[in-house]
Amino acid sequence: MNINDQIRKFILTNSKDFVATSTNIQFLHNYTGCNDYKLPNRLIKKTWDYINDFFPTAKRGITSNNPNYIKCLHTNSGAGKFLQLAPKHLDITAFNTDKYCCFISDAVCDDRATKNLYVSYVRDLADYFVADFKGDNKKYNIVITQPFGSKRDKVTEDEINYNEIDYNEEFSKMPPVTYYSKRAVEFLYDEGLLCVVVGGSNGILVKRELREDARVEFVHEIALNKESDYQVLIYKKI
């Protein structure tokens, strides 16, 4: 039995009575089945450092002058690598279509959940677009999305076939990297930030598509170096 099988068995066996200890979380971090497994921590930290300049209360805490928590949605949080390093006063909602990745994401965010600053759902962003979209969904100050490259990257445990269920025919035929990047904008407040985590040539595709999207403007790109597989493209909703 390989490590992924061991972890899946552990999750199925302990899901009801799980306690998020440092030992358990360290064990769960060995799981390679989530799409954020290879994301470098340094890239994530640089992204949050940049975001903190826009939303300082997420790091420092709310005040009488700024009494509202900054709200963040991760549309496919994987094993929670991005969320684990998030500023401690950020109010986070996480979506995941994989129940094992959702469990791990919940584990690494357990302390945040005890403070009512974290909630998760096993669902897909596309769920909101199965019928005529009214735009009355919940909005967030920050939306993070890490689209998978293609349907080949979806695992058999996934129960939702992303954008094929979208009522809009144009969107239903988009590749995932484009679909999630564009649909995620619908969940942002004005002046909110969209962070698209992409690897390789997918960054070029996202830039081209969002360049023509009048709802957002490009503000920053974060990468470790020119050879890095991953970068974070940051847009502001206007």
Image (spheres, rainbow, N blue to C red):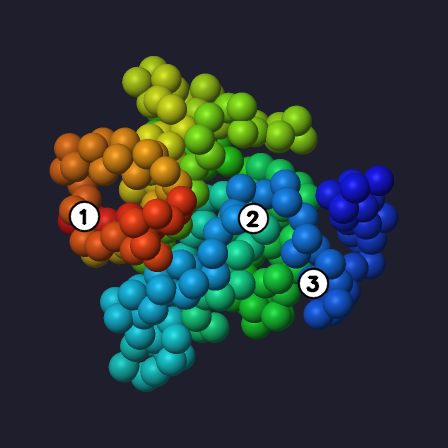
Distance of mark 1 from mark 2, alpha carbons?
26 Å
* Residue 37, label in figure: 2
Secondary structure of the residue carrying tag 2 is: loop
Q: Residues within 10 Å of mark 3 (few under 14, many from 20)?
A: few
Tell me residue 229's x, y (percent): 40, 44
Q: Where 160 falls versus 181 (above or below)?
A: above
The residue located at (45%, 65%) in the rendering is: 86
> What residue does disc 1 label?
218
Which of the numbered marks, if any, corresponds to residue 26?
3
Q: Position of residue 182 (x, y in %)?
A: 30, 35
| Residue 224 relative to residue 211: left or right | right
Which residue lies at the image location 79% right of the left edge and 42% below the top edge?
2
Q: Quadrant of residue 62?
A: bottom left
The residues tagged by marks 2 and 3 sit, at their Cα atoms, a distance apart of 13 Å
x, y percent for residue 58: 38, 71
Residue type, numbered disc 1: Phe
18 up-or-down from 207: above or below: below
Task: Tell me which label, 3 or 1, sits earlier in the chain.
Answer: 3
Label 2 is placed on what type of residue?
Tyr
* 142 horizontally vs 26: left or right: left
Residue depth check, mark 1 versus mark 2: number of the one nearer the observer: 2
Secondary element under disc 1, as helix, strand or loop, is strand
Earlier in the chain: of badge 2 and badge 3, it is 3
Q: Nearer the viewer, residue 28 or 169?
A: 28
Q: Earlier in the sequence, mark 1 or mark 2?
A: 2
Badge 2: few (under 14), some or many (20 or more) residues near its Cα, within 10 Å?
some
Crowd band around label 1 with a 10 angstrom C-alpha radius: few (<14), some (14–19), many (20+): some
